[in-house]
Image (tube, rainbow, N blue to C red):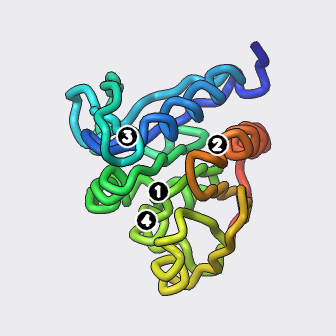
Amino acid sequence: MADELADTTVALFVAQRGTEQVEFTEPKQAVEDAGATVDVVSSGTEEAETVNDDLDAGESFEVDATFSDVSAEEYDALVVPGGCVGADRLRADDDAVTFVREMFDADKPIGVICHGPWTLVEAGVADGLTLTSYHSLRTDIRNAGGEWVDEEVVVDAGVVTSRNPGDLDAFCEKIVEEFEEGRHERE
């Protein structure tokens, strides 16, 4: 076990239903293996039900805190997994969106994968960033002022994005690196 994130506390979002399981479990494991403390944050305190391939039921996971109970001041970094339904639920939650905006405004690193960049769009922070995502979000990102590219992993101002579960190895490696670097000054 490495310890490059030993003093790092990460908020990991999960929708109450619909987050893609591997996009939740693999980044969680990666940052925990690097020594980080991870809090699973959701809209409610019930166990969150994940999915596989957006259709099949996945496992359920315990939630540590709700969006309304946490503050960006408590965390060093944020991970937002995808899953079409889960990401849509996250972007519709005002407290989740506010948390994303606060993390961004505090220059803290953020890792977002697949449909997760909808939260960046909804938070109004995509403008001027180069991002990747699941291909169906490209118009949303462009309309929000971001530049969309089709690449495995993209880092811009401490925001790490990837397209889909096939990119998880690169995504997990890059979030650990960016989280270790810490704050990234943004304009």
Q: Which of pointers 3 and 2 lies earlier in the amino acid sequence? A: 3
Q: Which of pointers 1 and 3 lies earlier in the amino acid sequence? A: 3
Quadrant in which the C terminus is drawn? bottom right
Where residue 78 is drawn, which disc sits there?
A: none
Where is mark 2, residue-wise? Answer: 168
Estimate the spatial distance between the alpha carbons at disc 3 and disc 4, rounded to whole Å.
14 Å
Disc 1 + disc 3, Cβ < 8 Å: no
Where residue 118 is drawn, which disc sits there?
A: 4
Query: From the viewer's perspective, is residue 28 above or below residue 90?
Result: above
Where is mark 3, residue-wise? Answer: 14
Whether residue 73 is visible to the viewer of this picture, yes or no, is yes
Residue 123, located in which quarter of the rendered image? bottom left
Q: Which of pointers 2 and 1 lies earlier in the amino acid sequence? A: 1
Q: Amino acid at mark 2?
A: Leu
Q: Position of residue 119 (x, y in %)?
A: 43, 62
Under circle 4, the secondary element is: helix
Q: Which of pointers 3 and 4 lies earlier in the amino acid sequence? A: 3
Where is mark 1, residue-wise? Answer: 116
Q: Nearer the viewer, mark 2 or mark 4?
A: 2
Q: Which of pointers 2 and 4 lies earlier in the amino acid sequence? A: 4
Q: Amino acid at mark 4?
A: Trp
Q: Amino acid at mark 1?
A: Gly
Residue lying at 63% horizontally and 47% vertically, measured from the top left: 166
Disc 1 + disc 4, Cβ < 8 Å: yes
